[in-house]
Image (spheres, helix red, strand yellow):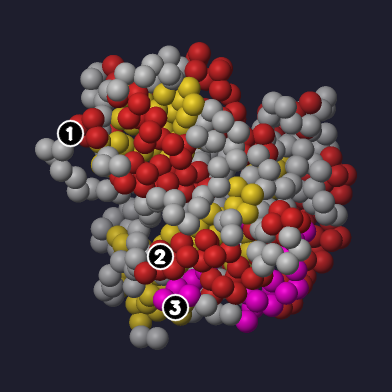
Amino acid sequence: MSTTENESVSNQTKFNFKQFDPNAPKHKKVHFISLGCPKNLVDSEIMAGTLMKDGYEVVSEAEDADTVVINTCGFIEDSKKESIQRILQMSELKSDGAIRKIVVAGCLTQRYKDDLVSGLPEADLFIGSGEFQNISKILKSHDEGNTKKTFFNLPTYLQEEETPRVNSQPKHRAYIKISEGCLKRCAFCAIPLIRGNLQSRKLESVVSEAKLLVADGAKELIIISHDFTDYGWDLRRKNPAAKESPENLLKALAEIEGVEWVRVLYLYPDGITPEMVQLIKNNKKLVKYFDMPLQHINNEVLKTMNRKMTKEEITSVLDMIHKEIPDAVIRTQFIVGYPGETEEQFEELMDFVKDNQFDRVGCFKYSLEENTPSGKMANQIEEEVKQDRHDKLMSMQQKISRKKHKAFVGKTVQVLVEGFSEETDLLLQGRTSQQAPEIDGVVLINEGEAQVGDMVYVKITDSMEYDLIGKIVES
């Protein structure tokens, strides 16, 4: 998926467990459909690990399973639609007798509870984001004849060091979720309603998990949360001497022997400190990649969004990063068509994007979410206007992206090999440190040999709108 597509559509991650015992009891076989963000994916991996610990087998195809678990996304309208669509698709398999049981889990379930249960009689079980860790007990009870269909609780569960989890990604990379919930209260966002308040994991727990993943082959650790810069705030509030902080976590992860890249996603600009920038600048394992959701740049719009920074403060943070790390990649996201956004305010945003020449830009058309402050605003923007603004911003960013990629031609870059290209097995595919999996482009390798997980050097010979093309060379 390119960075200029509408990122409001959920990603589906397929669990790649291709080998399984065809003679194993079918009622012990489970297929996962994990939709939405990487944070949701980690929940799916915890569910899979919990089930596998109790003797279940996770299979790659729904038709090979008895039970299908759909871990839904309920973030914005397009994500909800995709989740419902996948549930209905699995319902058809159930009607045909290919599967026996459908479990609907995740954010959409937590958010809509009774409405979802009454509207989807095809599903057998509904498990909210406060109960997913108990999926094995719930399935076993259901198999034994328990007719209870809904399992909801407050979203207070926090992953622990001993929590079972299986990495669904290629072994050379893994996500690590460092916290649950969110401290922010952006006016357009329903995440706190679904995931609750910020809960940070202990530093030792995160580092222990990271060491296990690296020992199992992970070369890239991708740190995820709703806002990395708030990590540890809740623990330090209770105990000012607590060592959980973004900077301490970066230091600890970079010290792990065997890790090559530590990538951080979701850094809100108000928490990016000079110390954090210096750490990333001076440690070769910390990827020079800032995934910084700005959402808008007009001060009036930022205020109504309940964002805690002004245009001037955002510009100051960007200037600091560019000054200290000139080759840093900045990836950001914007919302267009926010309630009350005028044409002049949109043009200010366009000028800002043009002036800053961001490496990666994603765009959301504003989605009206129930029970959020912006959802209650009277001056909603028509859908046609939202689409027009989205297309204009993305069209401009495509030109910037082509220019950025063209500048790589002739350079030699380090690439983490991912395997064969998704388009053809005649090409290898990999990523530079400037490309995050699933959301950014890739490097297509048309000359040279390498194994999955290898770190190689590639000379870039051509570029496309989102991807680079090159050949393997000696370092």
Q: CA distance from mark 1 to mark 2?
A: 31 Å
Q: Is residue 259 visible?
A: yes
Spot occupied by residue 153 in the image (x, y as percentages of width and height)? 56, 31
Residue at the extreme bottom of the image, as rendered: 475
Which residue lies under the disc numbered 2?
A: 212
Residue plotted at (52% across, 77% down):
255
Spot occupied by residue 128 in the image (x, y as percentages of width and height)? 52, 31
**Figure quadrant of the C terminus:** bottom left
Q: Is residue 441 visible?
A: no
Earlier along the polypeptide chain: callout 1 or callout 3? 1
Residue plotted at (56% across, 73% down):
252
Spot occupied by residue 334 in the image (x, y as percentages of width and height)? 69, 48
Which residue lies under the disc numbered 3?
A: 257
Q: Amino acid at mark 1?
A: Pro
Tag 2 secondary structure: helix
Q: Amino acid at mark 3?
A: Glu
Q: Is residue 410 above or below residue 380?
A: below
| Magenta part of the chain | 256-282
Which residue lies under the disc numbered 1?
A: 25
Q: Amino acid at mark 2?
A: Leu
Was residue 269 drawn as part of the magenta stretch in this picture? yes
